[in-house]
Amino acid sequence: MFFDDAKIASRILDIALTARQNDVPMCGIPYHAAESYIARLIKAGKRVAVCEQLESVPSAGSSIVKRDVVRVITPGTVIESNLLGSDDNNFLCSIYITKKEMGMAFVDVSTGDFFYLTADKNMEIFRGEIAKYSPKEAIIYAQSYETDTIFTEFIKSRNIPVHTLNEWHYEKEYMTEMICQTLSTHNLAGLGIESDIEIITAGSILQYLRDTHKTVFGHLKNPMKLASRDTMMLDEATISNLEIVENQQDGTRNRTLFSVLNNTKTPMGRRTLERNLLQPLVLRSKIDERLDLVDFFYQRAELAEEITIHLKEILDMERILSRFTIGKIQPRNFIAMKQSISASMKIKKIIHDCTIDNSMLTPLYEEFSDLSSLGETINTVIDDDPALSPEHGRVIKPGYLPELDKLYELKSDAKQWILKFQEDEKVRLGINTLRVKYNKILGYYIEISKGQSERAPKEYFRKQTLVGAERYTTEELQKFESDILGAADKITDIERREIEKLRLQIIEKSREIQMTASSVGYLDFICSLSISAILNRFVKPVINDNNYISIKNGRHPVVEKYYTKEVFIPNDILLDDSGNIINIITGPNMSGKSTYIRMCAILQLMAQTGSFLPVESADLSIADRIFTRIGASDNISRGESTFLVEMNETANILNNATDRSLCMGSCRVYSPLYKSENTFCHTLS
Ligand SMILES: Nc1ncnc2c1ncn2[C@@H]1O[C@H](COP(=O)(O)OP(=O)(O)OP(=O)(O)O)[C@@H](O)[C@H]1O
Ligand SMILES: [Mg+2]
């Protein structure tokens, strides 16, 4: 790295900054350790352009070799497992804002997930979506970057690096072409991408992927439109106040609703749980369907247990598939894929057996593709314990290719041949110090000590003279060497060819693998909800259409599970659209007011995620939104005081709540009697 890059990198990586002629600042890292240094730069929010030499030997007459940028690694586009760190989604986000509307798209290139939405230009929706997906990097239309600064500032305040793309990319025809090419379709009709905003947001994110990976992606899932009629929109304050997937103390998963409900066994399951907790359902039929599925496994604990055993064998199929698609694979990835396919097929069989007397599981069963023949193929081609690469040892299974087996035989016979050749020569020439040896510079050679070297016959060509010995070769030894080296090269070539063939076969089945991986994720998510219901004594809620919430002996799932010093005292909730529109709760400090209103919101959210509830009984209607205005917080770095944050959150509730919304709020009232927070909790009508 040179100039300013060198100055920045040397600080982040803590490496020496040196200088070349004319005082050009410079710093470098060892090539073999590049990945760990790159990981640190990415973590610091930087982008790293990897420039490689593209020719092995300089072309005749020229000492300049061709070099080019082969990849730009950025926080939102990483695919390498050691740079990703965890199995959480790693989203890249693209934003396009017009006078009245805004478009957002989210892609996780490591799993292939692709979502997009168009909404009214609204800061609350924007903040909610950013909080929901926690993108690691954002790209924004250059003009929006300059004119809609509050959006950009918000992203920056969450420490998300923001970039702009060349303006000429934002051309509708060009973007349409880009989407069709990437997703291999002739037109956008089948994808549901309709408006100009959708085309531009979806297209620009694909353009950025192409700019950074220097390739067209074939493994992205078809983009999924996020519509407010299917799922509940949660705002940033609610996601944070209810500690759904991150706690407010250290931002980790500990002591969150996620941690109570998480019994998933696969990375796909974990991601599905997180996504569904942040996208509660709003359609009764969908909620009932999911609750019934959870109930199915709740009633059959041994079945859930049996499935769980197989789920544990499934690795991150989505991410492995991404690596196959972009060609960054190690032979061990084949074994991981084989093992995951085999376990998924066992689960498919179990689900199939269940569908015989229960049609509820049929849709889930149908999502599982039949990948058994692909699993078989991998098993036949790849060794059960393959080497790190063909250069390191055997990858293709013995018995698969006779031609390859012969070459391996030749290679392993080589030792025997050399020993025999050495002994024969010793006897023939009567030189007892004669040895056949090998080094990288000379290859195979015959070494004879100085004292006996006079006896070397004339067919021995001298290769090297040392102080105490002479080194020779013969025509026979040279032929042997070229056969052996030829065999080693041939082995590597054949193995590479077979690996590539199998890689293409796997890519051909991308869609099926993705569908299976999603089904595994969904099943894992459902089983996880059933298992937590069993472990935590949760009860199936009843969903009604009558605009009331009636909960008997409700408990806060997180406080109950982790605050074990005292037994949690259950409380009832009754809210309806006549006499109980508003509940006002007052009481001294530490009496449980905040916990109570958080519990109301969390129980509602859990029910609409399809989870059972920590209650004696629950009968609740569907809320279109859940709003929370709890606790005092400020955000000085965003220029928001405590009062302003509270006012913004309250304004958001008043502007957006409908007669189907559940609203929670607390405010501090100073009275001569109580210096306490008085809390209100109501539904608006
Ligand atoms: N139903 C309950 N059963 C047992 N413990 C509870 C219950 N509700 C709350 N707690 C515990 O009581 C403590 C106080 O709860 P909380 O913060 O809700 O009180 P508060 O009334 O909002 O207080 P403040 O007025 O200071 O805001 C917490 O440690 C919480 O874990
Ligand atoms: Mg409180």
Image (cartoon, rainbow, N blue to C red):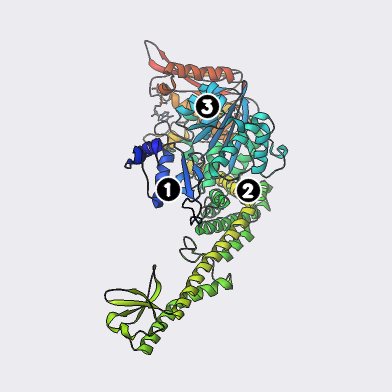
Question: Looking at numbered disc 1 in the image, what kind of residue is underneath it?
Answer: Glu
Residue 452 appears in the figure: yes
Q: Is residue 454 left or right of residue 39?
A: left
- Badge 3 density bin: few <14, some 14–19, many ≥20, Cα 10 Å: some
Chain-order first, disc 2 or disc 1: 1
Circle 3/circle 1 CB separation < 8 Å: no
Residue 206 at what x, y percent from top left?
60, 39
Label drawn at residue 35 = 1
Contact check, label 3 and label 2, Cβ < 8 Å: no
- Dividing the image into four equal quarters, which quarter contains ligand 1? top left
Residue shown at 29% from the left, 80% from the top:
449
Residue at 56%, 56% in the rendered image: 343
Instruction: State which quadrant residue 44 falls in.
Output: top left
Please, is residue 396 above or below residue 217 in the view?
Answer: below
3D distance between C-alphas at marks 3 and 2: 31 Å
Q: Is mark 1 within 8 Å of ligand 1?
A: no
Q: Is mark 3 within 8 Å of ligand 2?
A: no
The residue at which mark 3 appears reads as 127
Residue 152 rendering spot, x and y as whole percentages: 51, 26
> Does label 3 or label 1 sit earlier along the sequence?
1
Q: Determine which residue is flagged by label 2.
A: 515
